[in-house]
Amino acid sequence: MAEYDFDVLVIGAGPGGYVAAIRAAQLGLKTACAESRETLGGTCLNVGCIPSKALLHASELFEEAHDGTLAKWGVKTQGVELDLGAMHAGRQEAIKGLTGGIEFLFKKNKVEWLKGRATFQDAHTVAVGDRTVTAKNVIIATGSSVTPLPGVTVDQQRVVDSTGALELNEVPSHLVVIGGGVIGLELGSVWKRLGAKVTVVEYLEQIFPGMDGEIRKDAQRIFKKQGFEFKLGTKVTGAQATGSGVTLTVEPAAGGAPETIEASHVLVSIGRRPNTEGLGLDKIGLQLNQRHQIETDHDFRTAVDGVWAIGDVIPGPMLAHKAEDEGIAVAENIAGQTGIVNHDVIPSVVYTMPEIAGVGLTEEQAREKGEVKVGKFPMAGNSRAKTNREADGWVKVVADAKTDRVLGVWMINAVAGTMIAQAAQAMEFGATSEDIAYTCHAHPTHSEALKEAAMAVLGKPIHV
Ligand code: FAD
Ligand code: NAI
């Protein structure tokens, strides 16, 4: 009889966990995945990446029909109306299709789904619901959940977190977003396009902490032009429900006189924190770091033998594709192969319009490390963007002054989320800006702006 029930038990079926489980099974390991949600796919498929993108897509279509954008292209529309119910049905259809798809992939690859919450009994024994199983290797992929804000109670009606903001059954008259990060601007965009007034209250002096400085400045300018209001350097100290909404008390982050803001709805989006509660980590002697994350080595081994961790629960950007790549790598490492994730080349994308994307070092980080050359190209000089009336934004390439190696790429434009993949691939291959500049790009595409930004590093763009 086998020593363990499974070679690999994955806890959590988000993009980290389900990918790890499928790869482990592909590599011939007997694999189970514990998930307490009713559907697979984790935060990303159920209440994150996918439903938010469904609403971003639908709300953009509505806005284009409603605000005259389509009419300016000669597509006349009359009596454009919002059917919020149908929009939510579209979101649910996307979730159902994709979460069901993971269930199909589990069956196809013979990954057993253990339904219920998992708790360690010891490093190789885990209770899941009313079952207890043993596994030679356990991968913790429990993800993250919303960071609460003291003094502001989420009721998912008037005061919502990202999950509630995906499900509102009326368009807020005034949505106040607490936190000028990715969720705030993406979900703020959804409701603004559908007619809400949106005010972003951000603790810092600029939105999008961690991104390239020019991105932070220009993104805010573009959002302001779209009608977003910003209260920067401001902290929320309390929220009081009123008959028709919420009264927020705010004050300058640096201290000063408090004031109030009347909102119909409030979105709390000040970050996410790792899910480790109730896992029984004390039973296996696994300590958390100061940010309540599980530390691992480059192979995703924790300090406890046989226990591995990946995704939002470990340090690094809380992104689905980072979790997925770690899922593949950890399974390959468990199977005795060499699974590697290059954490220096992980793209990040904000799916607003225009989209915002970056990979590698910001210009500021690169300058701190040494001498750099920077090339920037405006989308107004790109024929396709100009033709499509998408001339807002630019592409920037940051390269090492001596070696010309690309250190970072940042961009704002309509298809930045797709374009950034090319930059990531070039960086993964150790490309120089000259390599990108002398690669033939199809015309007319937005991607030519990346080529021209690389040409600008060399001082020779054509279309500016
Ligand atoms: P998760 O996806 O959080 O999955 C963990 C799973 O583990 C959950 O299903 C949970 O139920 C389960 N679990 C936890 N504890 C236990 C337990 N003890 N027993 C059993 N099961 C357990 N990222 C992007 O890259 N692109 C985007 O566009 C994007 N959009 C987002 C939009 C929103 C609104 C939000 C909230 C997040 C978004 N993210 C996006 C972030 C992305 O969702 C996460 O980075 C990603 O889901 C992390 O994957 P994970 O596998 O580590 O964890
Ligand atoms: P975030 O970290 O992106 O932004 C949080 C913002 O809130 C920051 O600007 C921060 O300065 C601010 N803040 C913190 N405390 C505050 C306070 N008390 N008052 C006012 N502002 C405060 O976090 P967010 O937007 O909640 O998203 C969580 C995570 O989900 C992100 O880190 C991201 O990794 C992931 N995500 C990714 C998406 C994507 O890839 N497109 C989309 C949505 C989420």
Image (spheres, helix red, strand yellow):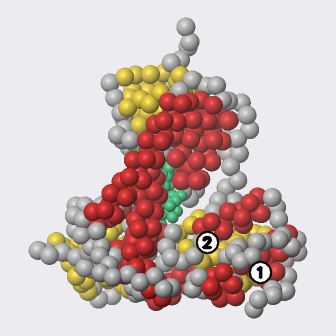
Residue at x-position 41% and y-position 58%: 51
**Quadrant (top left/top right/bottom left/bottom right) for the C terminus:** bottom right
User: Which residue appears at 49% of the width and 73% of the height?
Assistant: 352
* Among numbered discs 1 and 2, the one appearing first in the sequence: 2
- What residue is shown with label 2? 416
Left or right: residue 412 compared with residue 337:
left
As drawn, which residue projects farthest toward the bottom? 464
Task: Identify the amino acid type marked 2.
Answer: Ala
Identified at 68% across, 49% down, the residue is 341
Q: In the image, residue 225 lies at what x, y percent?
A: 46, 89
Residue 173 appears in view: yes
Quadrant housing residue 349: bottom right
Distance from the alpha carbon under mark 1 to that under mark 2? 15 Å
Residue 153 visible (yes or no): no
From the image, tell me which residue sits under label 1.
Answer: 452
Q: Residues within 10 Å of mark 1 (few under 14, many from 20)?
A: many
Quarter occupied by the N terminus: top right
How many marks the image carries: the answer is 2
Asked if residue 418 lies left or right of residue 370, the reply is left
Q: Nearer the viewer, residue 333 or 39?
A: 39
Measuring from the top left, give residue 285's x and y in whole percent.
49, 34
Label 1: which secondary element: helix
Q: Amino acid at mark 1?
A: Glu
